[in-house]
Image: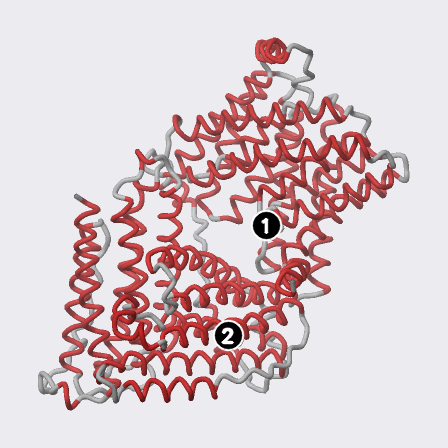
Amino acid sequence: MAKHTREIKTFFFSQYFSDGLRISMGLLLPALLFAQMDMLQTGLTISLGAVCMTVLDNPGPLLHKRNAMLIGNAVVFLVAVLTGFARYNLWVLGTVVTILAFIFSFLVVYGNRAASVGTAGLLAMIFIMDKALTPDKVIPYSLTVLSGGIWYMLMSMLFFGIRPYRAAQQALGENIRDIVKFLRIKADFYLPSTDIDDNYRKLVSEQIHVSQHQDTLRELLFKSRLLVKESTNYSRMLVLTFVDLVDLFEQVMATHYDYGQMRDKFGKSGILSDIGHLLHRMADELDNIGYAVLSNTSYHSNVRFLPELEELKVKIDAMGNTEQGNSNMVLKKVLVNLRDLNKKIIDIYRYHKIRNLKKPMGRSSAVEYDKFVARQDYSPRLLLDNLNFRSATFKFALRVSLVCLLGFIITKSSALLHFINAVTGKHVAFGQHSYWVLLTIIVIIKPAFALSKQRNIERLIGTIVGGLIGVAILTFVRNDTAQFLILAALMIGAYSFIRTHYVVAIIMMTPYVLILFKFLGVGHLNVAEERVIDTIIGSVIAFAANYLIFPTWESDQLHESLHEVITANVEYLIKIGESIAGIPVNTTAYKLARKEVYIKSANLSGAFERMASEPRAKQHKSKEVHRFVVLNHILSSYIATMASVVTSKPTYENKADNVKMIRRAIVALNESSKKLGGKVIEFSNELTVPNERSSVPANQLSPDEALLTEQLGFIHKIAHDIAKVTDNILA
C-alpha cells in the first residue's frame, strides 16, 4: 500500500503533472475570462493559439523554449493567414495542405524542437482549414490566434521564472528513479530465479530511458546560464548531483560479469543472493533520495550499508579458503564495486541534505560542462543534403504530405459520406469536424513504423473508450458545474499523460472534448460518433501509408547504429589503453567518450526495439541483431569495469601485455565497423609500452592486475564475438 501511495505522490510531484497543470491553465483561462464578457468565441480562438504553443512547451533551457515559441508564433500566424485565404478555393487549399505538410514534416531533420515548430504550424493549418471566415475577418482572426500563442508563451515564461530550478529538480529526481530501475534489473542477475537472457532485454530497454532523461538534464543544467554560469548554492547542488549520478550509473554498469559462470561457481554458496538483495536495498535507498529530490522535501537517512558490506567481505574471504580456491577474485571485485556504489549514494545524499555547497564551480567548470551538450546543426546544407530518396527524413515528409492530401480529398468527398450513411443505415453528420481526420493522421504518422503502429493502436483504443466515457458522463451527470469540473480534471490528466502514457491521455482527452462541444451547444452523441468515425478513417489511412508509401524499415538503416556504437566503444577503449600505457588522459575527454558510449548504446537499443515491432518479413536477422545488442552491452560494461580500476590506479606491472591485448581488441572492433560501413579509428602510436618485459608471471601479479588482465581477456573475446555476429548480420 505504501508503495502505491508513493507512486501516486510521485506522479503529482513530477514534471508531467506540472506540465498538465500549466497547459490546462493556459487553455482554460482565456476561454473562461472572455466567457464572462459574453465573448466565448474570442476566448476559444485565443485558446486555439495557445494549443499550438503547447507542443513547443517541452523540457529544456528557458532561452531555447522562448526562442522556439517566438518562431512558432510567427509560423502559426503566417499559416493561419495563408490557410484562411486558401480555403476559398478547394484546389488551392489542397495544394497548401500538401506543401505545408511536407515542409513542416521535413523540419524533423533539425531535431525535436524544430519538429515541434512544424507540428505547431500543422495544427494551425488543420484547425483553421474548416473555419468559415469572410475575407475581411481572416487577418483579425489570425491576430487573435497569435495573441493566444503569445499569451501562452508569456504564461509559460512566468511559470518557469517563479521557480527557475524546479524543472531541473524534477528531471533530476526522475533520472534518479530511472537509474534505480536499472540498478534493480542489474541486481536481479545475482538472483538464481532470474532468466539471464530475459533480464538483458529489460536492461537494454531501461537504458534507453536513462539515456533520454540524462540528455534532457544535460540541456537543462549545462545550457542554462542560471544553473551553470551564475552558479548559486542550489544550482551547484543540482549540477554536482547530476555529475555524481552519471558516475554512479557507470558504477552500476561496471558491476557486470559472466553471470552464468558465476552461478556455476558460487550458486550453491548463497553469496550471489546476498549480493542481489544488498543491491536491491541500495536501490531502495537511492529511490528514497530520488523521491526527496522530486518532491523537494528533506530526507534523513538512517540506513548504513558498511556493516553489511563487512559481513559480505567476511563471507567472500572465507570462500577463498574453501575448495573453490582463489576463484573468489571476481567476488572481491564485486565487493569493491559495491563499496564504490555505496560511496556515490552517500555523496548524492549529502548534496541533497546540505544544499549549501562551499565548492565553487567557476567559469572554467561551466566551459567543461558545456562540452557535454550536443549542438544542433541548423545550416541549410543539412536540409539540402536530405533532399533525396536516400534520406529517411525526406521519405517521411513526402509520406506525410501525400497522406494529408489523401485525407483532405476523402474528407471533402461526398461519395464517402453516402457510403458511411449506407453502412450505418442512418444519417451521420460526417464532415462537420472533418479536420479530425487530418489531426489523427498528423499525430499518428511518425518517422519510424513501430512508433506509428503503437500510436495508431493507442489512438483507436483511447478514442473509443474515451468516447464511451464521455457519453456516459454527459448522460448521467446533468449539473453544468459538475461537468465543468470533470472537464478540467480530464484536461489536466490528458496533458499530464501525453508524453508518458498516450493511450491514457487520449482516453481522458476524448471525453473532455465531448463535454466542451456540449457547452458549445453541439449534440454530444453526434459528436462522439463523428469523432470515432474520423479517428478510424485517419487511422486506416495512416496505417496503410506506413506500409505502402515510401516505407522506412529499421533493418534498412540499422547498420549505421551498429557501426556508431562500435566506434564509440573503440574511442572509450583507447582512453583506457592510454591510461594503462601511462599517457595522461584528460578527465573531460574520458567522460565525453563514456557519454558517447551510453548514448550510442541507447540509440542502438531503441532501434532494435522498433525493429522488433515491425512485420516479421521486414525484420532482417533479428536474432543476430539482438545478440549484437547484448554483446555491445557486455563490452561497454567490461570497459566500465576496467575503467574503475584504471582510473584509481595509474601504474601497472604488466603494461606491455595489457596494451597489446587492447590493441588487438581495437583492431577486431575496427574491422567490424569497416564491414558495416563505418570509419576506422586510428589509435595513437603512443599506445604501446616499449623497452619493458613482455610479461609477468601470473603468480606475481597483484589482485587488481590479475583482475585487469582477466577483464582484458573478456574484452578481447567479446570483440571477436562481435566480429562473428557482424559477419552473420551481413551474410
Q: Residues within 10 Å of mark 1 (few under 14, many from 20)?
A: many
Residue 646 place in picture, x, y as percent: 29, 81
Q: CA distance from mark 1 to mark 2?
A: 43 Å
Q: Is residue 412 left or right of residue 386?
A: right
Q: Residue furthest front?
A: 268
The kind of secondary structure element at disc 1 is helix
Q: Is residue 565 left or right of residue 442?
A: left
**Residue under the image location 69 percent in, 57 percent down:** 157
Task: Report the amino acid beneath label 1.
Answer: Ala
Q: Is residue 230 above or below residue 408?
A: below
In terms of depth relative to the viewer, which is nearer, 684 or 560? Answer: 560
Q: Which residue is mark 2?
A: 281
Q: Residues within 10 Å of mark 2 (few under 14, many from 20)?
A: some
**Residue under the image location 40 percent in, 84 percent down:** 312
**Residue under the image location 40 percent in, 76 percent down:** 275
Residue 582 place in picture, x, y as percent: 23, 83
Q: Which residue is mark 1?
A: 68
Callouts 1 and 2 close, C-beta under 8 Å: no
**Residue under the image location 31 percent in, 81 percent down:** 645
In terms of depth relative to the viewer, which is nearer, 245 or 92? Answer: 245
Residue 207 place in picture, x, y as percent: 42, 59
Asked which colour scheme the image uses, the reply is secondary structure
Point out the tag, 1 or 2, that comes first from the N-terminus: 1
Q: Is residue 154 above or below residue 539?
A: below
Q: Quadrant of the C terminus?
A: top left
Q: Residue furthest right?
A: 37
The kind of secondary structure element at disc 2 is helix
Task: Report the amino acid beneath label 2.
Answer: Arg
In terms of depth relative to the viewer, which is nearer, 201 or 631? Answer: 201
Tell me where residue 682 sits by quadrant. bottom left
